[in-house]
Structure formats: structure tokens, C-alpha cells
Image: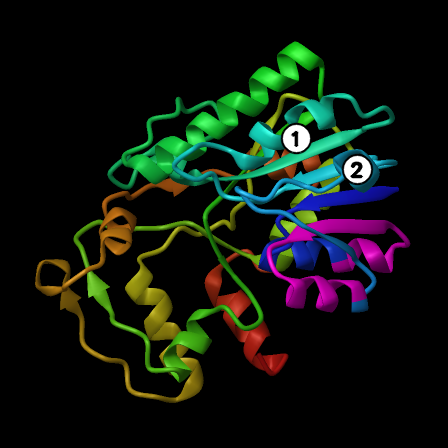
Amino acid sequence: MRLFVFGMGYTAQVISLRLLDEGWQIAGTCRTAEKKAALDAAGIRAFLFDADMPLEDAKAALNGATHILHSVPPGEDGDAVLTHHGGDIADLSGLNWIGYLSTTGVYGDHQGGWVDEDTPRSPAGPRGQRRADAELGWMAHFEQASLPVHLFRLPGIYGHGRSALDSVRAGRTRRLYKEGQVFSRIHVEDLASGVIASMKKPNPGSAYNLCDDEPAPPQDVTAFACELLGVPVEPLTPIEEADLSPMAQSFYGESKRVKNARMKDELGVRLAYPNYREGLRALLAQGA
């Protein structure tokens, strides 16, 4: 099996390293020569790619790929992978699976209500709209070119080096409070399990929510991280009193609970960390 990854970021590297351990060949893209050298040293053949820097020789880079994972966020000009290399991907023979890492932001705001994969796309802002447009572009590719496309809608991702524990240690936390606000999240290792399960059991045209079992208010997650670290839990700050960046404003402008039944029933995923408490306890025990 040979996986080619567009966008070898945090999540994609966790997936890739697990597959390397299973004997897969892994290649992927990054944006800098320094990152390329680090990936090459880790056993991942790296190629430079960005929105304004297509693959220099796409045919050679993609040759032999059986699986493609796409984790590059769309920009204002659209999905760079689809724009630059959609045709190259469609020309591949022996391609078993394509996975596009999207976000639950495509559902928009549901005022704390539940959503599943059949909930219509209704993004609330430009970032969510770009994701929805990218999903539609890849699904059109699925229908027109019979490509084995799968969509993965991701909530907040945490794991080693990227959790509420790290934020508390760095003094970067504020317990913002907004009435009824909840978010879904997932430990990166459970996310990787879902993607890998789909690779081994393709169902082209499908979408999956990859999230844990317990949507929760963000201030509760921060408070639990403080308790684990033995530091004082700071008081709540009403959202109206916070000077938020435009990105944070969009973040708090949406509230929903995301269902994960399809991930469990179809892909057979059993969560190692079904809620943030178990995930954070494990990270602390692992020295993260």
C-alpha cells in the first residue's frame, strides 16, 4: 500500500506514522525545505507543494499511490489540490481510496442541537463555506470521474502537544462563557483510527463525522485540565466582555453536538478516548 498525503500537518503525520509501522510506503507534501528534510528523515518521501507552488512533477510524485489523503485547507481561491492536481489524481490507476479532511463547520450553527452526516450543509461564515465548496468539488469528482472519495468532518482536535493541558501550562487559557455553548472534539489517535478504518474498508461517496461521545462546553475542558495539573481554576469570563479575534468570534458563533454513530457502526471504530476527561488523563499519564 502507498499513501500520498497532500498537507503533512499534525493530524496527517499521526496517521502516516501509524501506517509506516504497518509497512506502508508514505509520501506527502509540505511547504518548506526544512519540513521536507524532517519528513524525509522520518521515512516519509516529501515533496514541496502550496497553493502557488504545484507539484513539480505530479506524475512522478503520485505514481503508484493506492490511497490519497487530503488535509490542505481551502483558501480564498478555492481548493488548491483540486485546482492544480484534480486531473492528475483522476488519471491514476490502482487508486483505492481518497480521503478529504473537512470540518464540522460545514453544518453551521444549530444552537446546541445534534447533527449527523445527513444534516444539510449550512455553513455560517466564509471559512465554513470554503470547506463546503471543497466538499462539493470532491463529490463532483467522485461522480464524474468515479473516484473513491470519502469525506471526514472533524471537530476540535487535541493530542500530544496540542491539548488543554498545554494551553494551561503556557498560560494561554481563558474560561469564556456563552450560554448553551458546546463543542465536539476528538483525540487525534481516535481520529487516525477512523481514517485508517475507512482506508481498509472503502465506501466511496460516504461522509463520516469523527468525534468523541461527549460534546461539552469549552470552559469545562479548561477547568478539568487545571484540576489535573493542580493549578487554580480561573473564573468565567462572559463572552460579551471578551475581546475576540475574528476567528474566535466565528468559533463561538456556532454551537452544535455532532453524532458519531456512522463512524462506530460502519467503520467499527471503538474510541480509546470517548470523552475529554479520559483523553486528558491519558495525555498527562503519557507525559504530554
Q: Is residue 248 left or right of residue 188?
A: left
Mark 2 burial class by Cα count in 10 Å: few <14, some 14-19, many 20+ = many
Residue 30 seen? yes
The location of residue 19, given as percent across then percent down, is 80, 53
Name the residue beneath numbered marker 2: 62
Q: Is residue 36 magenta?
A: yes
- Judged from the image, the secondary structure of the residue bearing numbered disc 1 is helix
Q: Is residue 126 left or right of residue 15?
A: left
Q: Which residues are magenta?
A: 17-40
The image shows a total of numbered marks equal to 2
User: In this view of the protein, which residue sits in the foreground, 135 or 78?
Assistant: 78
Task: Assign the C terminus to one quadrant of the image.
Answer: bottom right
Q: Is residue 237 left or right of residue 73?
A: left
Name the residue located 69 percent from the left edge and 14 percent from the top edge. Answer: 145
Task: Assign the N terminus to one quadrant of the image.
Answer: top right
The location of residue 169, given as percent across then percent down, is 41, 83
Pointer 2 and pointer 1: residues touching (CB < 8 Å)? yes
Name the residue beneath numbered marker 1: 85
